[in-house]
């Protein structure tokens, strides 16, 4: 990112879309329509939970994608910290992924709360799964706040990378909380250790589709957000460049 | 003004003043004030503390099973407990004000009294967690949570007619 590229960027460089992201976006939209049709209309109601089981198709993919997003944040942060791959692009991917992860975790918490009201009879309770999830959510809001603390881009990248590598350690605790302790939350239906998948075929397919669509949506969001963060950083840099240019002009005026 | 600059010999020649764009220096501050981030961070630390307290006081071993009352440490009768068991078939009685039912787990059964109508998908033969106190052999509940299992089956009207029992109901009859 030199002076000329940040100051004289063509309008093409100032957008976050590419033919790839446009194609991906269309794919996400089509997949989302399919997911809504399958999730809300085609897939069956559950024998115990009735229609409320449909919340699962947003709740479970939301939680899994939040895990994935936070793992990507950790891997990108490690790539930034490692000297041979150090690049602010890794830092921006980490930041973008964490933002999207917090969004998906929020979706999972809200849908889970509504689902809990319908099946358990309560919006919230402090069992191990819900408590560790709340802690994970709060941790990554803290991570995003640390990114906003100021300083140079490199300072921001270093601070947040260390935090990301610590925070990702919470994920196994959240995932296995339902096996480690007595919880109101049910155990993992599909990704549990030694769990025999005991789910209606069409329900399982819809859930799988939900994970695929949410994954594509995650990639689309992170690509755009990562590029908009790069433009943000460019703006900061050009702010400095502009100040220097102004100072230079001032100095020249004084000598003449 | 010009005199001052000339005195200091600043700006008289291009070499005397380094105006080339600097690489990253600590002076490259982001324009945004960090106050919102600091406030969020304070709130996050406070919320994290509350969540951690809840984890230590509530989340570890959320409930005791019916057969663990008086047998497992932390499950002593006489103070507030959360007890998990399966609602006995045919035991649910509701007089409009109070709901009474029996709850079993591991071969032990206790009667439960709850002021009100349990929410969620409460029914017989489903596992529930009841919050309350065991007094004179009766568990006085003030909160009922339904703990459904993780098997999902299509709600098929034919099967309901033929078998007359749900997947949870099968577990109940065992």
Image (cartoon, rainbow, N blue to C red):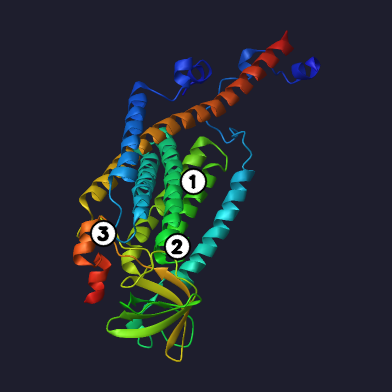
Q: CA distance from mark 3 to mark 2?
A: 19 Å
> Numbered disc 1: what chain?
A
Q: Residue at x 80, y 18 (%)?
A: B1
The quadrant in which residue B36 appears is top right
The quadrant in which residue A83 appears is top left
* Of residues A94 and A101, the one drawn nearer to the viewer in this rendering: A101
Which labelled disc corresponds to residue A159? 1
Looking at marks 1 and 3 on the same chain, the residue that comes earlier in the sequence is marked by 1
Which labelled disc corresponds to residue A63? none
From the viewer's perspective, is the residue at label 2 or at label 1 nearer? 2
Rendered position, A221 above or below B45? above
Q: Position of residue B39 (x, y in %)?
A: 62, 50
- Tell me the element at label 2: helix
* Of residues A94 and A239, the one drawn nearer to the viewer in this rendering: A94
Looking at marks 3 and 2 on the same chain, the residue that comes earlier in the sequence is marked by 2
Task: Decide if residue B164 is in sight here.
Answer: yes
Which labelled disc corresponds to residue A192? 3
Left or right, A81 with respect to B30, comes to left
Q: Residue at x 29, y 61 (%)?
A: B150
From the viewer's perspective, is the residue at label 1 or at label 3 nearer? 3
Q: Residue at x 23, y 76 (%)?
A: B173
The quadrant in which residue A237 appears is top right
Q: CA distance from mark 1 to mark 3?
A: 34 Å
């Amino acid at each position: 990112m030199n002076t000329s590229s940040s100051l004289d960027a063509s309008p093409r460089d100032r957008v976050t879309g590419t033919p790839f992201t446009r194609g991906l976006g269309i794919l996400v939209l089509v997949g989302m329509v399919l997911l809504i049709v399958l999730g809300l209309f085609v897939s069956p109601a559950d024998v115990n939970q009735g229609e409320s089981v449909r919340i699962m198709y947003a709740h479970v993919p939301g939680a899994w994608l939040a895990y994935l997003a936070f793992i990507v944040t950790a891997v990108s942060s490690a790539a930034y910290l490692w000297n041979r791959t150090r690049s602010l692009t890794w830092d921006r991917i980490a930041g973008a992924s964490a933002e999207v992860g917090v969004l998906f975790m929020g979706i999972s918490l809200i849908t889970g709360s509504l689902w809990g009201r319908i099946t358990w009879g309560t919006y919230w309770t402090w069992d191990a799964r819900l408590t560790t999830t709340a802690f994970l959510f709060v941790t990554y809001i803290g991570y995003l706040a640390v990114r906003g603390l100021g300083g140079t881009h490199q300072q921001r990248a270093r601070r947040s990378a260390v935090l990301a590598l610590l925070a990702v350690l919470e994920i196994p605790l959240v995932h296995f909380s339902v096996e480690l302790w007595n919880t109101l939350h049910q155990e993992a239906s599909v990704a549990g250790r030694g769990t025999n998948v005991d789910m209606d075929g069409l329900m399982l397919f819809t859930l799988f589709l939900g994970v695929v669509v949410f994954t594509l949506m995650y990639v689309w969001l992170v690509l755009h957000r990562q590029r908009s963060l790069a433009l943000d950083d460019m703006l900061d840099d050009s702010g400095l460049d502009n100040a220097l240019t102004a100072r230079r002009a001032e100095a020249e005026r004084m000598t003449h | 003004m010009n005199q001052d600059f000339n005195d200091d010999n600043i700006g008289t020649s291009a070499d005397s003043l380094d105006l080339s764009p600097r690489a990253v220096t600590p002076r490259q501050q982001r324009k945004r004030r960090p106050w919102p981030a600091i406030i969020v961070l304070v709130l996050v630390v406070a919320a994290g503390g509350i969540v951690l307290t809840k984890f230590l006081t509530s989340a570890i071993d959320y409930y005791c099973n019916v057969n663990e009352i008086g047998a497992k440490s932390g499950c002593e009768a006489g103070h507030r407990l959360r007890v998990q068991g399966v609602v006995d078939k045919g035991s649910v009685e509701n007089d409009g004000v109070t709901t009474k039912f029996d709850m079993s787990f591991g071969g032990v059964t206790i009667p439960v009294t709850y002021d009100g109508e349990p929410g969620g998908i409460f029914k017989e033969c489903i596992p529930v967690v009841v919050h309350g106190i065991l007094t004179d052999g009766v568990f006085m509940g003030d909160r009922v949570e339904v703990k459904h299992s993780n098997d999902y089956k299509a709600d098929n009207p034919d099967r309901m007619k033929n078998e007359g029992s749900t997947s949870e109901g099968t577990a109940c009859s065992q």
